[in-house]
Amino acid sequence: MATTFEVKVKDKKGKTYFKTMKADNVNQVKQKLREANYTVMGIKEKGIAPTSMGGMGEAASGLGAKLSKMMEGSVKLKDLTIFSRQFATMINAGVSMVRSLGILAEQSESKVLQKCLYEIKDQVEQGQSLSDSMARFPKIFDNLYCGMIKAGEAGGVLDAVLLRVAGFLENQNRLNTQVKSAMAYPLTVMFFALIISGVMLMFIVPMFAGMFEQMGAKLPAFTQALVDLSHFLVSPGALLIPVGVGALGYGFRMINSTPKGAYTIDTYKMKLPVFGDLIRKVAVARFSRTLGTLLKSGVPLMGSLEIVRDSIGNLVVASAMEDLRIAVSEGEGLAKPLERAGVFPPMVTQMVAIGEETGAIDAMLEKIADFYDEEVEAAVHALTSMLEPLMMVLIGGIVGSIVIGMYLPIFDIVNKIK
């Protein structure tokens, strides 16, 4: 049976519509909407629609879609990269596709990927194309992956395309690792800073507070504030802190789940001091690598721009991609719309223009991606080097402030005794 989806789309004139559609999976919905010249703004599964009594074909298709959803789960980028490279090697060596899929399923360390490969193998044996079979698992094989596989099948160069996919995934994994390492250090230090300050406020400050109360000392304003905060943290009212943090997190998630909210958040991300420049470089690197790889694999330009738009992970850049796609469909080149978008640095637009002039746009995009990968790596290294002393100063400042606050009354008592 087919699944009913609620979709939000925008036509060429920019008017927004809400529709309901029946399809086996999200990729099928997207394909139908693109064929109708709609821009997809959001897709949400509504429920399972009843199948017609038209025969066993629809029932089998619905059952296959349901089975695909049951099997879907997370697959590490590393496992997907290894699969792609090994699959390419076996196809190039003359091993049949069905046999290759069976062998790779048997030796896969990922249980989720293993189940999916067995299902894909069965579908290919029944006469379905590899790209259509993979499209049944959109959480594992996304539009980008399936688009490249489809182009490889059409051009008879599936092994070369699979190697290109593996290289793309390796670059993507390296870029993701660099970004995570940039974010991990400050978050880890902040976590330990909160733990240390919390322990001091909840266990050490009350000991000093009891001593000061016995001495009848008048507390300075800063010390009194620390004591009051300590009392709050050990009281039932402290439960308001995790509740408040949870509410903020939920609110942020709800805002980010709407197209307008996510666009606003992505806009502010790119304007953040220090981190904004890194986010912009990552977006440019992903755009260049993805578009260059798709074009080199034989995916048509319009289809490539749609895939980049849907997989870029940043709504500001995705909006620029949609404007670029519309401009290209009206006969413009790539360079001018990229320049108008205001997202891409002048070097990118100039190199794209040169690539168009020389007819080597895919090679030029890969050079841009290589350059910005190095830029991201350098930015991460510089950011880490800058944050290390700042984080140490932060922890020292927090601990030092609490210690000084506890000793201020003692200094006052000593001065009075003198």
Image (tube, grey):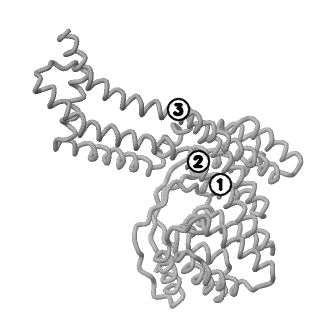
The answer to whether the residue labelled 1 contacts the one labelled 3, judged by CB atoms less than 8 Å apart, is: no
- Can you tell which mark lies on residue 108? none
User: Measured from the top left, where is residue 357 in percent x and y?
Assistant: 87, 45
Residue sitting farthest toward the bottom:
56
- Can you tell which mark lies on residue 174? 1
Q: Could you tell me how far apart the alpha carbons at marks 1 and 2 are, in whole angstroms?
A: 9 Å
Identity of the residue drawn at 63% across and 49% down? 322
User: Measured from the top left, where is residue 338 in percent x and y?
Assistant: 71, 41
Say which residue label 3 marks: 389
Amino acid on which the number 1 mark rests in the picture: Arg
Amino acid on which the number 3 mark rests in the picture: Pro
Identity of the residue drawn at 44% across and 70% down? 4
Crowding around mark 3 (Cα neighbors within 10 Å: few <14, some 14 to 19, many 20+) is few
- Counting residues from the start of the chain, the first of labels 3 and 2 encountered is 2
Say which residue label 2 marks: 179
* Residue 376 image-quadrant placement: top right
Picture layout, residue 223 above or below residue 139: above
- Specify whether residue 326 is in view: no
**In the drawing, does residue 96 fall left or right of residue 310?**
right
**In the drawing, does residue 41 fall left or right of residue 234?**
right
Q: Nearer the viewer, residue 165 or 36?
A: 165
- Counting residues from the start of the chain, the first of labels 1 and 3 encountered is 1
Amino acid on which the number 2 mark rests in the picture: Val
Picture layout, residue 272 above or below residue 192: above
Q: Nearer the viewer, residue 58 or 91?
A: 91
User: Measured from the top left, where is residue 349 in percent x and y?
Assistant: 76, 39
Mark 1 vs mark 3, foreground winner is 3
Q: Mark 2: which secondary structure? A: helix
Q: Could you tell me how far apart the alpha carbons at marks 1 and 3 are, in whole angstroms?
A: 26 Å
Q: Could you tell me how far apart the alpha carbons at marks 3 and 2 are, in whole angstroms?
A: 20 Å
User: Measured from the top left, where is residue 16 in percent x and y?
Assistant: 50, 50
